[in-house]
Image (spheres, grey):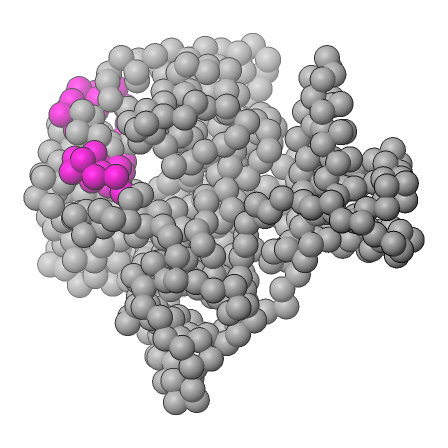
């Protein structure tokens, strides 16, 4: 039995086998092969497995984002069947007497370069697809494919660190817990753990040899135990049963209003990052979606999501929520959320740099595509739109001009849409200080406490070395929230919180006293917060 300590992200306990997730950063080596026929068979076996993985991904994407969003996996399957591509690999194996990994990597580079040099834009886009399927084949051949779709049971995922683009593609139904060596308590992996209601530890010195071993992740104690003794297994089982009992009791609050004893009603919405997350929001009886992080459509894609791909995703969420409010945040790429095909320059201070609405207002075509998709989807439900990182009235006025122009386009084309509520994220001291003026321009505010805390305290929330200085309860942060609520109401806007602080139960009563209208939290926090609010005077 081995015990390791880390920093707990979510107070819960999980037990299961470890799945060691390893990034595929290794260089493909050229090795001489004597039996080339056996190597060719090895390639064909890997190709069949890659096809199976892509079919699973296609079916999963169809369920979550519709056929349009899943089409990329169909394209990849067809490319794996391409005769020229496969013949090139088999020819290199035979003529050069080399390993399949090397033959795939060389063919992938050659075909990718060939497509990239073409004049036709569609063919140019295939360069990334060839690279993707080649990397998948190399991973399968090297036994490092890390495909969670192949797992037969849920696992404890152990990794050096996880990027947002990696977590968004994982099969959430197969995750019991996260354990990482790096990352911070405010990273997107941490947010995902809280969204999924699973324990997570950071700062644990991980080892590849743990793969497949039984382990216990204790979010109460902040410990990871490898190969636990029977006594600890029994104790963990008891704790998990007690947690399940408490969750069952909370479910008696389903269908109840979120209202204090004095009759003050608070709206409890859910934060989601994908279409699939709407299931969790409905299961936990959220009254609506207070934050749909649309950037994850971009993070999980290898190309700019088309208007139709986005429309299908937004439409599906709106329909699934059956008339309940769905607030969709426009693209918030930049800072820690990097997307290769955006070709953003490296910045010394990315959190203070070219991100979110700044990208949208300077790359207007990307913004207009998203707004068209959002407005088209509004015809199928109760959609509201909010804009991140706003620091001036001038920005809102420019956004409203673009929005009006997009509406005119749709009207001329005879495409149906509804007039949507618009709001802004309050996440900088600048937006707080001018919140009364901003409120006159919009219908609502949503306070993003993660960034507001970061910018107010001048602390990089992604830097784990600063976790001890990061204080979300700092008086300055709470005064910023109070000022925003008061100024929003003066200007005629309702005010909510969609940052992590909204689920901080030590502050729930204070937020209600401040006059907050809405709290949007990870789905699993909806019922516990309802219980607290219903017991308030």
Q: Along the line of sight, which residue is nearer the eye, 156 or 466?
A: 466
**Rendering quarter of residue 509:** bottom left
Q: Nearer the viewer, residue 500 or 413?
A: 500
Q: Position of residue 316 (x, y in %)?
A: 55, 41
Left or right, 424 with respect to 515, comes to right
Q: Quadrant of the N terminus?
A: bottom left
Query: Where 202 falls versus 446 (above or below)?
Result: below
Point out the image quarter for the C terminus.
Answer: bottom left
Is 449 colored magenta in this rendering?
yes
**Is 143 colored magenta in this rendering?**
no
Which of the 4 image quadrants contains residue 304? top right
Up-down relation of residue 384 to residue 450 (above or below) = above
Q: Residue 132 or 192: which is nearer the viewer?
A: 132
Specify the segment rendered in magenta: 432-461
Answer with left or right where residue 36 lies relative to residue 246: right
In the image, taking residue 278 as reference, residue 125 lies left or right, namely right
> Is 208 left, or right, of 72 in this rendering?
left
Residue farthest to the bottom?
A: 231
Q: Is residue 300 visible?
A: yes
- Foreground pick, 335 / 442: 335
Residue at left offset 21%, top offset 39%: 459
Residue beneath the point at 35% across and 70% down: 4
Indicate the quadrant where residue 228 lies: bottom left
> Residue at the spot x=36%, y=23% of the render?
354
Q: Where does residue 438 sit, x and y in percent of width and height?
A: 21, 22
Asked if 394 appears above or below 278 in the picture, the reply is above
Using the rendered image of the protein, determine whether residue 260 is visible from the camera's viewpoint: no
- Give the percent coordinates (x, y) of residue 25: 57, 45
Residue 297 position, x and y percent, is: 52, 36
């Amino acid at each position: 039995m081995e015990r390791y300590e880390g920093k707990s992200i979510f107070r819960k306990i999980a037990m299961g086998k470890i799945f060691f997730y390893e990034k595929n950063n290794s260089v493909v080596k050229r090795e001489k092969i004597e039996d080339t026929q056996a190597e060719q068979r090895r390639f064909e076996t890997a190709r069949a497995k890659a096809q199976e993985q892509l079919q699973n991904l296609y079916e999963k994407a169809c369920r979550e984002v519709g056929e349009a969003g899943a089409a990329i996996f169909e394209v990849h399957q067809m490319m794996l069947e391409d005769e020229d591509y496969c013949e090139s690999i088999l020819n290199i194996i035979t003529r050069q007497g080399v390993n399949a990994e090397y033959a795939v990597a060389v063919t992938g580079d050659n075909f990718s370069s060939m497509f990239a040099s073409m004049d036709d834009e569609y063919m140019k886009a295939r360069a990334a697809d060839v690279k993707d399927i080649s990397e998948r084949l190399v991973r399968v051949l090297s036994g490092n494919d890390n495909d969670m779709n192949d797992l037969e049971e849920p696992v404890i995922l152990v990794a050096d660190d996880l990027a947002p683009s990696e977590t968004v593609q994982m099969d959430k139904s197969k995750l019991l817990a996260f354990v990482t060596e790096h990352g911070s308590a405010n990273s997107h992996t941490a947010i995902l753990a809280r969204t999924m209601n699973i324990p997570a530890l950071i700062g644990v010195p991980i080892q590849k040899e743990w793969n497949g071993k039984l382990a216990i992740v204790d979010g109460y104690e902040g410990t990871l135990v490898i190969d636990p003794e029977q006594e600890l297994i029994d104790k963990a089982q008891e704790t998990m049963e007690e947690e399940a009992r408490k969750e069952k009791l909370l479910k008696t609050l389903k269908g109840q209003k979120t209202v204090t004893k004095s009759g003050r009603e608070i709206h409890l919405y859910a934060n989601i990052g994908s279409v699939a997350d709407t299931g969790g929001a409905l299961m936990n009886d959220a009254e609506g979606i207070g934050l749909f992080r649309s950037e994850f459509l971009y993070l999980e894609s290898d190309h700019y999501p088309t208007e139709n791909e986005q429309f299908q995703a937004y439409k599906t969420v709106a329909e699934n929520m059956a008339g309940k409010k769905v607030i969709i945040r426009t693209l918030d790429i930049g800072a820690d959320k990097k997307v290769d095909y955006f070709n953003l320059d490296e910045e010394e201070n990315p959190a203070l740099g070219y991100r979110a609405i700044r990208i949208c207002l300077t790359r207007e075509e990307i913004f207009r595509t998203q707004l068209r998709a959002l407005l088209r989807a509004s015809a199928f439900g109760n959609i509201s739109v909010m804009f991140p990182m706003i620091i001036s009235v001038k920005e809102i006025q420019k956004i409203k001009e673009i929005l009006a122009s997009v509406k005119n386009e749709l009207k001329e084309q005879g495409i149906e849409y509804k007039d949507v509520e618009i709001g802004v994220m309050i996440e900088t001291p600048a937006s707080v200080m001018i919140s009364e003026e901003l409120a006159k321009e919009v219908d609502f505010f949503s306070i993003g406490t993660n960034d507001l805390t970061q910018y107010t305290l001048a602390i990089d929330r992604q830097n784990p070395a600063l976790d001890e200085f990061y204080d979300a309860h700092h008086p300055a942060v709470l005064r910023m929230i109070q000022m925003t609520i008061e100024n929003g109401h003066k200007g005629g806007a309702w005010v909510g919180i969609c940052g992590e602080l909204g689920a901080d139960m030590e502050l729930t009563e204070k937020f209600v006293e401040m006059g907050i209208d809405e709290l949007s939290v990870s789905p699993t926090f909806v019922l516990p917060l309802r219980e607290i609010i219903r017991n308030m005077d």
